[in-house]
């Protein structure tokens, strides 16, 4: 397979007011991009060839969120490029492309200052997670495009002997009066210039910003031409399947004789932690390993994990994560309303299995794998191969599972070892059952809520006591080979502070020690914590005798953007007040720099929760691509519906027992509700949306079920038998 780093796209835009400091841009814009013959590089993000084609180097991995459309659209608009001449390629794996929000989001807090500085400096913060892609790179890429535009305009102005202010860049050309030069004709002269202060385009000058341009990867995904990691094919490549030992467990036995009877088997590799079979086809390898019936031993795991969360809250005084006012004084002589909410650890349930391909070519090693953290994946691959990263080429492939599982590329080490043994390229693909077993689950949470209604209804005091673990922190610790234990950091408790103007608030957090591997999941921990917060707000509203929307609005004077979202969702859904007999429920959330209000219409049919309609209103700041935002919100809502209604797994040996997709009871197409998404116009900085829709689905639906039936759902996945 020839590896083409560039994929031609069709599309483009944003929008002059801010000044890009000249001092921030070096002479000649030296960067880490490698320009091919006929190309000129403009810094770290943009290349222009002599034919006028603009290539945008995107640091973030495409996981289905559309970032390979959105960021090129930002560049094309600011640069003045013709959208049908814009291409995209993955940015090189260098430190220049680390996620600038890694520190701000608390991702490195568990490593200590020295190690965190080293990780940030070597490029391992090149991570696609936490709805950060647009928030992290929209502004830097706008600035880079503005500088490149100034260089092109300056080159044209010099050639025509006119002032730069008399020139305009648009549609891949620079014009002045009746004269025109294409970007391709100007690129070589422009690349050697040093720009002065550069102004960004004003919003009114934007051509493409905010427009619902179609997804550029949509056609290739529809017709199967987009290559995922499982599509890699190399000369003389062999295929492998594997089984992994439970966490802390080991392989105890298997039938080698049964394997050898399967045609096409080339090699069997048995280690303490895994067993793999290499064959001429993956199907032969999988048949052989099934026939071998490998046996493992692992630690005993309780059938119900909820008591472990309860033990965490009971064992010690939880850490005070946040405090405002004096909760104890206000509630000392009062009887507060109390409720407990539980979100069970959840599987990603993605369709893309874990896979990786490795090839040794002389002194070099090449690896293909889907990964949201390519810097970490490359470092682990180099360690597994016993060679320096300089002698390893990692190809981070597009990710087929947007739930977040691909932050850890678990199949890479096995692929490397088998390729070394066979002296041929080997592609390892774990079956769906093994991928489920060894999922890094979202950790879940147990939240004990207490609240005291104030005079006239609004809440006077609020407390959350929560036991949880740190999913993203655990994933990052495993990637870095660090200790994942210790106090909860921001990545494990972000979203626990309510957005409401409650004078006395306290959040207490305890770390739950779980016998399962926890990991990063889209929308978490905000999804779990919003379920408790917005469900409990609904309970407080009912206890105060107030309509749920009015109750929320009375406490949102300091959060006008969230208030507007709730009002807009209620208006679009024709909110009926959510009284007894209604089928409507309401929830809101501020997360990832964005805000969302949701009205759900739901009922109970045949002992199952049935959601009929979802109406969301979103303020995510300056919108780059309205269609992508709408898709992400709608997709997040449906994904969260699956998480809220799926059957809980059984636990065995520190793992979730694998099940068929039909046994998980995920919603089918016919079960999917009508989804309406309204976007607000905003000039605020752009926020994240990939995880935003996941946060509000469960509480809005639970509140709708209470309106319809009087039953309060306090467990996720929804458990009608436990309804209060």
Image (cartoon, helix red, strand yellow):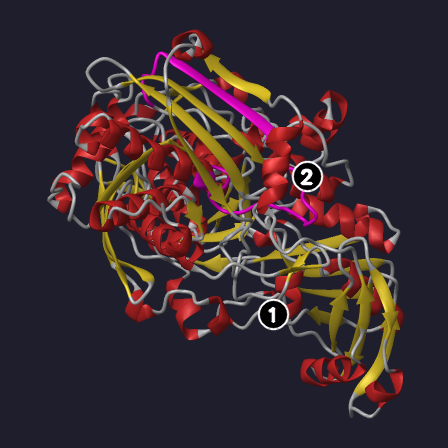
What label does residue 432 carry, if any? 1
Residue appearing at x 80%, y 81% in the figure: 292
> Which quadrant of the figure contains the N terminus?
bottom right
Residue 592 horizontal/vertical position (percent): 42, 33
Up/down of 489 relative to 65, above or below: above
Question: What residue is rendered at 67% in x and 84% in y?
Answer: 283
Is residue 367 visible in the rendered image? The answer is yes
Residue tagged 2: 513
Compare residues 282 and 660 and report the one nearer the observer. Answer: 660
Residue 472, located in which quarter of the rendered image? top right
Helix, strand or loop status at disc 1: helix
Mark 2 nearby-residue class (10 Å; few <14, some 14–19, many ≥20): some
Q: Toward the viewer: 339 or 321?
A: 339
In the image, is residue 674 above or below residue 185? below
Labels 1 and 2: the sequence-earlier one: 1
Pick the residue in front: 667 or 409.
Answer: 667
Q: Eyeballing the image, is 664 above or below 325?
A: below
Stretch in magenta: 500-528
Magenta part, dominant SS: loop
Q: Residue 619 at what x, y percent from top left? A: 28, 34
Q: CA distance from mark 1 to mark 2?
A: 27 Å
**Residue 462 placement, left or right of 706:** right
At x 25% / y 19%, what residue is drawn?
A: 458
């Amino acid at each position: 397979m020839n590896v083409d780093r560039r994929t031609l796209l069709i599309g483009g835009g944003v929008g002059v007011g801010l000044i890009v400091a000249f001092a921030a841009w070096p002479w000649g814009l030296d960067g880490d991009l490698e320009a091919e013959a006929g190309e000129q590089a403009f810094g770290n993000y943009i290349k222009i060839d002599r034919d006028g084609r603009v290539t945008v180097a995107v640091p973030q991995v495409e996981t289905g969120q559309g970032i390979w459309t959105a960021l090129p659209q930002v560049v094309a608009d600011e640069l003045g490029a013709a959208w049908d001449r814009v291409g995209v390629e993955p940015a090189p794996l260098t430190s220049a492309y680390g996620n600038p929000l890694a520190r701000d989001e608390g991702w490195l807090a568990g490593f200590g200052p020295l190690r965190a500085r080293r990780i940030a400096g070597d490029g391992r913060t090149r991570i696609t997670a936490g709805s950060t892609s647009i928030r992290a790179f929209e502004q830097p890429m706008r600035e880079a495009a503005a500088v490149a535009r100034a260089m092109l305009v300056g080159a044209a102005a010099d050639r025509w002997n006119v002032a730069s202010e008399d020139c305009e860049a648009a549609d891949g050309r620079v014009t002045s009066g009746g004269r025109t030069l294409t970007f391709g004709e100007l690129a070589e002269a422009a690349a050697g210039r040093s720009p002065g202060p550069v102004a960004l385009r004003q919003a009114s000058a934007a051509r493409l910003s905010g427009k619902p341009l179609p997804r550029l990867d949509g056609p290739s995904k529809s017709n199967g031409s987009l290559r995922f990691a499982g599509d890699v094919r190399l000369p003389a490549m062999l295929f492998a399947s594997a089984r992994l030992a439970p966490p802390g467990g080991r392989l105890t036995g298997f039938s080698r004789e049964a394997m050898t009877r399967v045609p096409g088997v080339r090699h069997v590799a048995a280690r303490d932690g895994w067993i793999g079979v290499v064959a001429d086809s993956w199907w032969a390898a999988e048949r052989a390993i099934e026939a071998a019936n490998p046996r493992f031993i692992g630690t005993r795991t309780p059938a119900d994990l909820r008591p472990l969360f309860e033990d965490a809250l009971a064992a010690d005084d939880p850490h005070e994560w946040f405090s405002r006012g004096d909760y104890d004084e206000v509630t000392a002589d009062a009887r507060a309303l109390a409720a407990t909410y539980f979100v069970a650890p959840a599987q990603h349930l993605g369709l893309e299995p874990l896979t990786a391909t490795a090839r040794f070519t002389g002194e070099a090693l090449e690896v293909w794998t889907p990964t949201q953290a390519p810097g970490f994946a490359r470092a682990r691959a180099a360690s597994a191969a016993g060679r320096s990263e300089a002698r390893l080429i990692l190809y981070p492939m597009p990710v087929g599972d947007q739930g977040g599982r691909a932050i850890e590329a678990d199949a890479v080490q096995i692929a490397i070892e088998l390729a070394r043994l066979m002296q041929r390229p080997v592609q390892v693909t774990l079956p769906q059952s093994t991928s489920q077993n060894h999922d890094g689950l979202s950790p879940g949470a147990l939240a004990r809520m207490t609240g005291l209604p104030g005079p006239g209804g609004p809440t006077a005091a609020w407390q959350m006591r929560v036991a949880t673990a740190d999913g993203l922190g655990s994933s990052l610790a495993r990637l870095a080979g660090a200790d994942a234990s210790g106090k909860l950091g921001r990545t494990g408790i972000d979203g626990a502070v309510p957005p409401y103007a409650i004078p006395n608030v306290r959040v207490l957090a305890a770390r739950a020690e779980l016998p399962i591997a926890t990991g990063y999941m889209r929308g978490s921990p905000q999804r779990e914590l919003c379920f408790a917060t917005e469900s409990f707000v609904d309970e407080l509203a009912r206890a105060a005798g107030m309509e749920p929307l009015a109750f929320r609005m009375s406490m949102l004077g300091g959060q006008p953007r969230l208030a507007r979202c709730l009002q807009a969702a209620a208006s679009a859904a024709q909110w009926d007040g959510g009284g007894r007999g209604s089928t409507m429920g309401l929830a809101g959330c501020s997360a990832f720099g964005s805000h969302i209000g949701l009205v759900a219409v739901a009922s109970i049919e045949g002992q199952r929760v049935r959601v009929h309609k979802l109406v969301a209103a979103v303020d995510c700041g300056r919108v780059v691509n309205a269609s992508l935002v709408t898709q992400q919100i709608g997709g997040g809502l449906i994904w969260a519906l699956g998480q809220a209604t799926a059957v809980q797994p059984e636990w065995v040996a520190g793992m979730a027992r694998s099940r068929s997709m039909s046994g998980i009871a995920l919603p089918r197409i016919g079960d999917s509700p009508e989804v309406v998404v309204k976007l607000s116009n905003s000039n605020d900085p752009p926020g994240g949306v990939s995880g935003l829709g996941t946060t509000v689905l469960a509480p809005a639906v639970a509140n709708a079920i209470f309106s319809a039936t009087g039953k309060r759902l306090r467990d996720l996945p929804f458990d009608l038998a436990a309804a209060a």
